[in-house]
């Protein structure tokens, strides 16, 4: 059975970098936006819609009346989202079964739970995340805007995780290892992490 | 400056074993009940009282009226507890400055924050913790009693941590690394962990 590492991460924590470097070091496949590209091939929706649904906001059109007994008919927004999420779950499983891999986000830890992935959560202090995103932005956005983004993106990830898994995204019970990158050099951290899979 | 590793842990998670093995492997000093013994030498209180105050329940006699403006005089229960906790903080610092070490519990992560300890939290699922304590008990207590103990001990650790640090004990923001031992072999886990301090 292939070795699977899933990485959930707070916005700006460097979790994606942890995943990319770890995959590189171990010679594992790395899946992040690759999942979006595959989804675009297998469904008829726009890239924008897929990106929104596939990890961020599972039901951007989620209507308040959904679930009401007075309106039992399925909502087209929800049906569309479920179609994309089902396609995504199928693609993630196909990718995971192909070879050893690192998968970023998308509740892959839960979707692949029968395959016993090693589940990592990467987090950091607000200050550290802000500093990291500011450096990445290189002046494109103000600090205030980035703080807002940070909150909004994590809120969507939390909502997505809850929708797909029924559980809390930022609860350590769902992970094998939770890593604080606040005072860490990610390269050294990954050199050490890699020993776990050697 | 000595390398300091602090280990906070849920009851039954095997955190103490992680600490003991890690200290052994790295050749670091290991401090757990050693702290109680030193406290007994430096204060006049009973072992039972010190054990209760030193990590579990900082103010077992904490009266409801404490802090009320109508009763501004210090409560003897609180003064005694503060005396023990101050002595403990002093001992922990002396121990930490002596050599590289692993310290179990007692909010050492916070007490030594200026010395930049590496802060680990060890946790596990309820089932896993129950199985571990049942094995350790070897039939001495019923499952029901152990479940009760598990809750009660963690509640006291939470209360102690909050009293000493003003923060939440089971919040990953206070730690550099959080380890789930539910599906893990502790010996292998420690072999890997040790690489981080090599």
Image (cartoon, coloured by chain):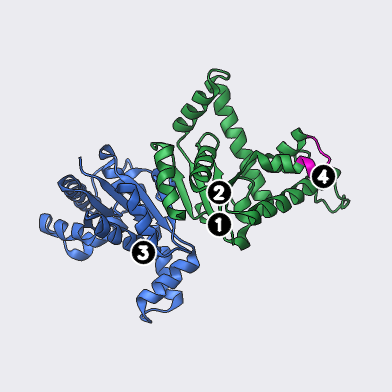
Chain colours: A green, B blue
Residue at the spot x=44%, y=46% of the render?
B172
**Residue that label 2 marks:** A28
Magenta stretch: includes residue B175: no
Q: Chain of mark 2?
A: A
Tell me residue A175's x, y (percent): 52, 54
Pointers 3 and 2 in contact (CB under 8 A)? no
Q: CA distance from mark 1 to mark 2?
A: 9 Å
Secondary-structure class at tag 1: loop
Please tell me if label 4 and label 3 are on a single chain: no
* Residue range highlighted in magenta: A40-46
**Residue that label 4 marks:** A80
Tell me residue A161's x, y (percent): 64, 48
Residue depth check, mark 4 versus mark 3: number of the one nearer the observer: 3
Q: CA distance from mark 3 to mark 2?
A: 26 Å
Q: Earlier in the sequence, mark 2 or mark 4?
A: 2
Q: Earlier in the sequence, mark 4 or mark 1?
A: 1
Relative to B63, is A157 on the left or the right? right
Residue at the spot x=55%, y=57% of the render?
A3
Residue extending farthest bottom: B139
Residue depth check, mark 1 versus mark 3: number of the one nearer the observer: 1
Tell me residue B23's x, y (percent): 26, 57
Relative to A83, is B5 on the left or the right? left
Query: Mark on residue A3?
Result: 1
Secondary-structure class at tag 4: helix
């Amino acid at each position: 059975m292939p070795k699977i590492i899933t990485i959930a991460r707070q916005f700006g924590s460097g979790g994606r970098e942890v995943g990319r470097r770890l995959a590189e070091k171990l010679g594992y496949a790395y899946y992040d936006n690759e999942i979006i590209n595959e989804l675009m091939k297998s469904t008829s929706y726009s890239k924008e819609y897929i990106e929104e649904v596939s990890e961020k906001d599972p039901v951007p059109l989620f209507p308040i009346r959904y679930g009401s007994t007075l309106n039992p008919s399925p909502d087209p927004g929800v049906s569309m989202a479920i179609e994309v999420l089902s396609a995504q779950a199928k693609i993630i499983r196909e990718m995971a079964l192909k070879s050893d891999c690192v998968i970023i986000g998308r509740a892959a830890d839960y979707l692949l739970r029968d395959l016993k992935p090693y589940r990592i959560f990467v987090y950091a202090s607000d200050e550290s995340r802000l500093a990291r995103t500011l450096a990445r932005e290189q002046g494109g956005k103000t600090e205030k805007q980035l703080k807002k983004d940070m909150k909004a993106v994590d809120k969507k990830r939390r909502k997505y995780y809850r929708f797909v898994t029924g559980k809390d995204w930022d609860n350590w019970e769902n992970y094998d290892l939770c890593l604080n990158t606040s005072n860490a050099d990610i390269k050294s951290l990954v050199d050490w992490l890699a020993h776990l899979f050697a």
